[in-house]
Amino acid sequence: MQHNVLILDFGSQYTQLIARRVRELNIFCEIFPYNNIPSDLSSYKAVILGGSPFSVRGEDAPHPDLSQIRGKLPLLAVCYGSQYLAHFSGGEVAASNTREYGRANLSYIKEDEVFFEGVSPNSQVWMSHSDSVKALPTNGVKLASTHDVEFAAYKIEGETTYAIQYHPEVYHSTDGKQMLENFLVKIAHVPQNFTPNAFVEEIVAEMKEKIGNDKVVLGLSGGVDSTVAAVLLNKAIGKNLYCIFVNNGLLRKNEFESVLNQYEGMGLNVKGVDASQRFYDALAGVTDPELKRKAIGNAFIEVFDDESHKIEDVTWLAQGTIYPDVIESVSVKGPSATIKSHHNVGGLPDYMKLKIVEPLRMLFKDEVRRVGASLGIDPELLGRHPFPGPGLSIRILGDITLEKVRILQDVDKVFIDGLKSWGLYDKVWQAGAILLPVNSVGVMGDERTYEKVVALRAVESTDGMTADWVHLPYDFLMKVSNDIINKVKGVNRVVYDISSKPPATIEWE
């Protein structure tokens, strides 16, 4: 892969967003922790220092070794990076009188400065810091100010080093993308050659060389990541790719059959395995969400192992791991607290003895979809909402029974079909239904009922890290609620979840 831009992570919540903005410029970039800088920087054209929750004045402040970077490669220091350069290079950083967080406007921009070409006067930027640069570092030159921050941007004479105290990567910095482009393209002269077609060409060649004539087994889920990974591998090694699609009994209604039919038309070598009962047995009486995930993960590995043993001389296991999973595992803060186990990362027992191949490990979710489009994958499949690895088990709160699965599959189908028929499906990032562990009093005809409650959930997001609930039309919610109650036996009440992430998560378990 082309190593064009190196982003150093100091623990900021925005680091991934910087990478996404750089990628949007068709420039490849990678994130590394500040304390694990690659030893060979010869292939990098520029470096970006990210923000941080730490203060440069604190004893625990991150201290990167910039000896091989400063003055040798074009450098853009953002927020904490800007303060770091000032604090340790002859300038001064002090606590702000008030925490500077939120929108601000550039009240001064130095004339004829390439970094600000195409940036409108009074441009809005996003501040997020409690320290401020009070005096510039040695050879520093002021480039921009806001009403409250005199040194909102500066550069260092004699170096290709620029520093800004705001975040150009966030949506609220209206010309932020332009500033990044000015720095990377006009100042650092980084080539804009990272495109879906270029990625496919490069990764296919890389996998051909890496895998050779070996056999690869891949567990398909019917989702976007595993499907794109399968098509890429099929392009590289053809008949030596063996795909296994396991029905865990917790998929959407009729999904096992419909996804298998879709794969047939794509020329993939796929075997469908209906192991529903094995999963139901493993889940019997289990109510704790983490134990459900573990039970499903263990059952999947057992089924997958049984099936892969039927293929002679398999050497590789392919996975649909994507870049956010990789970043999380090497984060400067270490793996985050376990909110929930991830179904795709780090789950192979020693006895399987397979080498791992992850063709998508350097891509963000939206990039996976673009690569899939360039491979000619059906837009309907690429547009599918994310679906949790443990399936409906974590949308059934409490223990799992066949009757509960039947109810939730029927409810989910009414909801998803309704979104599609109303033209709302593609406006939603993820949608689904949750079966609550409570019964509710109702009236049907002249009789009282005591039946299940379901919650509908629809969110908009770009990568699942944050999400807002979708303001679905009241008329739609009224229609889908009536349809669920009238058509799904066992349900007499429908509610709509209007929580955002954070503080809630997208799934309920």
Image (spheres, rainbow, N blue to C red):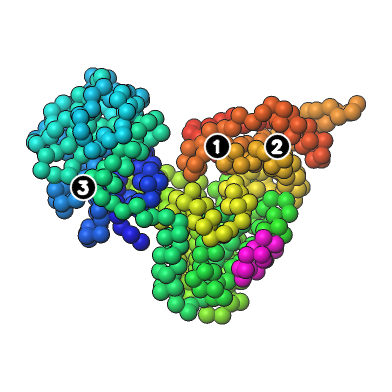
On-image quarter of the N terminus = bottom left
Q: Position of residue 240 (x, y in %)?
A: 54, 75
Q: Which residue is disc 2 drawn over? A: 422
Q: Is residue 378 above or below residue 481?
A: below
Q: How far apart are labels 1 and 2 at the CA level?
A: 17 Å
Q: How far apart are labels 3 and 2 at the CA level?
A: 50 Å
Q: Earlier in the sequence, mark 3 or mark 1?
A: 3
**Residue 14 left/right relative to 289:** left
Q: Is residue 156 above or below residue 328?
A: above
Q: Which residue is disc 3 drawn over? A: 74
Q: Of helix, strand and loop, which one carries label 2?
A: loop
Magenta part of the protein: which range? 260-274
The quarter of the picture where residue 448 lies is top right
The quarter of the picture where residue 308 lies is bottom right
Name the amino acid, label 2.
Trp
On-image quarter of the C terminus = top right
The quarter of the picture where residue 378 lies is bottom right
Specify whether residue 19 is in view. Answer: no
Name the amino acid, label 1.
Glu
Name the amino acid, label 3.
Pro
- The residue shown at (51%, 36%) is 467
Magenta-drawn stretch contains 270: yes
Q: Which residue is disc 1 drawn over? A: 460
Foreground label between 1 and 2: 2
Q: Earlier in the sequence, mark 3 or mark 2?
A: 3
- In depth, the one of 389 and 68 nearer the eye is 68
- The residue shown at (76%, 31%) is 479
Q: Give the residue at the far right of this rendering.
A: 446
